[in-house]
């Protein structure tokens, strides 16, 4: 097969990093649902010994993700938070410090507050949309900058290239949580990042069938460190879920194209609706960072956040009145999911801090799926009408 550098992204999603199995040349890589592997002799094996360390099906997924990222094979985990936790345990020790986006997934905040602070690792959550604030937060103990862009759930952006220049000046690592866009819509490494973080649970799988995460980098020593920590804490992706994600990846570019088309139509409708106070979507002219989105993303994505003029109680009623949208706290699947961040994804965040970050109790997050956009709009309209939000 030609080098991935010579192939389009749709072709890479189907063929990149993939090889036929050596036994039957199955077009789908086999599922090696096994805990252990037989050694040919003492100290002699075929590269696999125990599935907590590595597994052929997981290896196949890692090669496929690496092909999308443009890196060596990634390292895959049982959950997205398994990837995030491994990242921080790999590069930080007691006394070290990290700079992180203030608008970030609640679980990333929780790992610091509930685990890392307790073992002597500190973190500063700052407005990474302002590179000056990022640089001001760096201390002699800072080892990594961790940005999530677009941020969850307000979709606030960080300028990856600008932050990467700061990281390089200070000889520290830059990791980018690229879950909302994937390597299809945003390429962190081309913008100077050292590490790409994905929750494969979301768009990479795309079918709400698995939970997983990945870390990708060009640095072989970091990859070795990630695998060592993963083996030690036992957080490797399971073979069956890896096999499912291998199938989901094949349609990723096609799915994202439709996701984005539908999201743009729905965001435009929401912005014009008399019941809606504000819409957060990087593709709208009203989005304050639209220029940055156009610079570092190939599309605005398929996540929308919005607030109603009628306030929090009305938002809750709308959430409870939808009939086609599914009330759920994940994202990136075929089905449109509607979420109340302050009671789900960011429930563990102090309410005062949530409000400071723009995560009001009335904020609604929409992960736009592949249903016809007109049907989603009709569902939202009937929910607005049923709760007396429409004027």
Image (tube, rainbow, N blue to C red):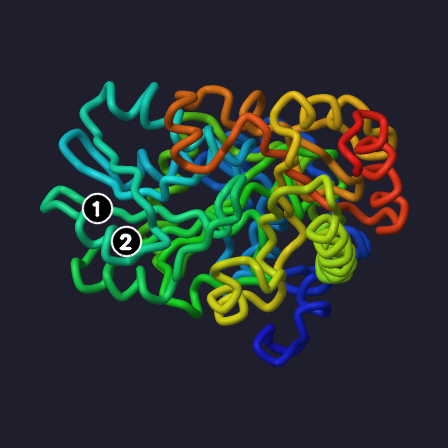
Residue under label 2: 173
Across and down, in percent, residue 287 comes to 54, 58
Across and down, in percent, residue 103 comes to 42, 40
Residue under label 1: 143
Across and down, in percent, residue 72 comes to 47, 60
Is the C-beta separation of discs 1 and 2 under 8 Å? yes
Q: Residue furthest front?
A: 391
Q: Earlier in the sequence, mark 1 or mark 2?
A: 1
Q: Residue at x 58, y 49 (%)?
A: 280
Residue 47 visible in the displayed image: no
The one of 78 and 379 positioned closer to us in this rendering = 379
The one of 155 and 13 positioned closer to us in this rendering = 155
The one of 328 and 287 positioned closer to us in this rendering = 287
Q: Quadrant of residue 387?
A: top right
Across and down, in percent, residue 58 comes to 60, 42
Name the element at disc 1: strand
Q: How many marks?
A: 2
**Horizontally, is 374 left or right of 367 in the view?**
right
Q: Quadrant of residue 328?
A: top right
The answer to whether 168 is drawn above or below residue 270 in the figure is below
How many residues crowd around disc 1 within 10 Å: few (fewer than 14), some, or many (20 or more)?
Answer: many
The answer to whether 244 is drawn above or below residue 23 in the figure is above
Q: Residue at x 23, y 57 (%)?
A: 132
The answer to whether 152 is drawn above or below residue 374 in the figure is above
């Amino acid at each position: 097969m030609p080098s991935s550098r010579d192939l389009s992204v749709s072709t890479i999603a189907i063929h990149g990093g993939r090889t036929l199995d050596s036994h039957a040349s199955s077009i789908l890589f086999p599922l090696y649902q096994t805990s252990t592997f037989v050694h040919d002799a003492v100290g002699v094996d075929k590269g696999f010994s125990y599935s907590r360390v590595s597994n052929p099906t997981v290896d196949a997924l890692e090669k496929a993700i690496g092909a999308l990222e443009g890196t060596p094979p990634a390292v895959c985990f049982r959950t997205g938070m398994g990837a995030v936790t491994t990242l921080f345990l790999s590069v930080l020790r007691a006394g070290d410090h990290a700079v992180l986006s203030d608008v970030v997934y609640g679980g990333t905040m929780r790992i610091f507050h509930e685990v890392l602070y307790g073992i002597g690792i500190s973190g500063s959550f700052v407005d990474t949309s302002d590179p000056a604030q990022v640089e001001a937060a760096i201390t002699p103990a800072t080892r990594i900058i961790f940005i999530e862009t677009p941020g969850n759930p307000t979709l606030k952006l960080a300028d990856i290239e600008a932050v990467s220049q700061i990281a390089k000046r200070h000889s520290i690592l830059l990791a980018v949580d690229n879950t909302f866009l994937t390597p299809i819509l945003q390429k962190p490494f081309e913008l100077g990042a050292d590490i790409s973080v994905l929750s494969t649970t979301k768009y990479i799988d795309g079918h709400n069938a698995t939970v997983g995460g990945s870390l990708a980098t060009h640095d072989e020593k970091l990859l070795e460190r990630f695998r060592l920590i993963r083996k030690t804490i036992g957080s490797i992706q399971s073979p069956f879920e890896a096999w499912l994600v291998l199938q989901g990846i094949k349609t990723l570019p096609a799915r994202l194209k439709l996701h984005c088309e539908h999201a743009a139509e729905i965001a435009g409708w929401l912005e014009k609706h008399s019941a809606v106070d504000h819409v957060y979507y990087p593709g709208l002219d009203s989005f304050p960072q639209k220029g940055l989105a156009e610079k570092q993303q190939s599309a605005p994505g398929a996540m929308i956040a919005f607030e109603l003029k009628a306030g929090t109680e009305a938002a809750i009623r709308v959430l409870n009145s939808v009939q086609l949208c599914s009330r759920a706290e994940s994202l990136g699947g075929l089905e449109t999911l509607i979420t109340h961040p302050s009671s789900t994804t960011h429930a563990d965040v102090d309410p005062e801090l949530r409000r400071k970050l723009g995560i009001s109790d009335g904020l609604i997050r929409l992960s736009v799926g592949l249903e016809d956009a007109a049907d989603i709009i009709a569902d939202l309209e009937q929910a607005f009408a049923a709760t007396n939000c429409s004027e």
